[in-house]
Amino acid sequence: MGCKIGLAATKRCLVLMRAILILPMLAFLAACQVASPPPTSAPTSTASSDNLPKLAPDVAMNNFRTVVAKVDPIAEDICRQETPDQNCNFTIAIERDRNAGINAFQTLDNAGNPYLVFTIGLIEDARNIDELAFVMGHEAAHHIARHIPRQRASAQGGALIFGVLAGIAGGDASMVQNAADIGATVGARRFSQDHELQADALGTVIAYRAGFDPERGAQYFTRLPDPGETFLGTHPPNANRIQIVRDTMANLR
């Protein structure tokens, strides 16, 4: 089982972001970051959490502890059922540096141990406990679906193809390296929107089985600028993500 934030017996909860920063696994690609909004024709949410007040910091932290205690064992159980060959012992960590912004991401250490990292900004920005549960389920789903190794393989393939093409075109070593860097970026982002929607769907299942309301939790997207259909954007339109949650819940019911 993963850590339970705030319990003295826990050995894995005091992980600082500065230690996480050395983990070489493209964590930024799995992060719940935001971008800017063009309109979309996809279904839109009928409700918004814009008008809900922020919770007091102590209430927000208590909610986070409750979510960890309930979501972590469900996520680990689903992980072991779906991918019994990988490490499913999640470490859930808090980045307390307020300069880290509002964010959450999944990453791996060098031994393949999975980490789910939440900034204090995101914990305190959540308007209710269901939003935290949905985000935690989403980040756990990235690991269960093996998105980091898949993105890494795609990045390596993109780097190889672009580098070879630059070499064939007569580029020098610097040009080949620059082309490989571009190829790695393109490759890593090639499937990122699909990965986000997959994580939304599986994260819905995790949060629901843990006893939370994923549709209420997904209203978190109504407060985020919409990335829209940007070229090589890492995240899909918010309305598409809300619809995935609704569709998944309809199937669960």
Image: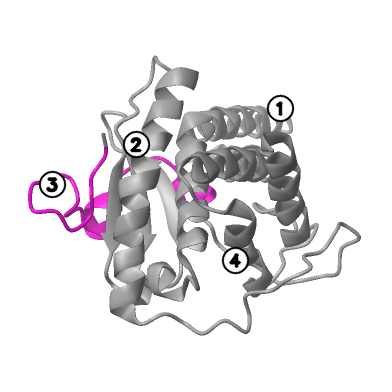
Q: Residue under circle 4?
A: 220
Q: Is residue 13 above or below residue 97?
A: above
x 8%, y 47%: residue:
9
Determine the CA span between mark 2 and mark 3. 14 Å
Determine the CA span between mark 1 and mark 3. 55 Å
Point out the stretch of residues depicted in magenta. 2-30
For numbered disc 3, what is the local secondary structure?
loop
Q: Residue under circle 3?
A: 10
Q: Which label's residue is closer to the chain start, 4 or 1? A: 1
Name the main secondary structure of what is drawn in magenta: loop
For numbered disc 4, what is the local secondary structure?
helix
Q: Residue under circle 2?
A: 73
Q: Does any portion of residue 183 appear in the rendered image? A: no
Q: Which label's residue is closer to the chain start, 1 or 3? A: 3
Most extreme residue toward the right is 41
199 left or right, relative to 63: right
- The amino acid pointed to by label 4 is Tyr
For numbered disc 2, what is the local secondary structure?
helix
Please, which colouring scheme is shown?
one colour
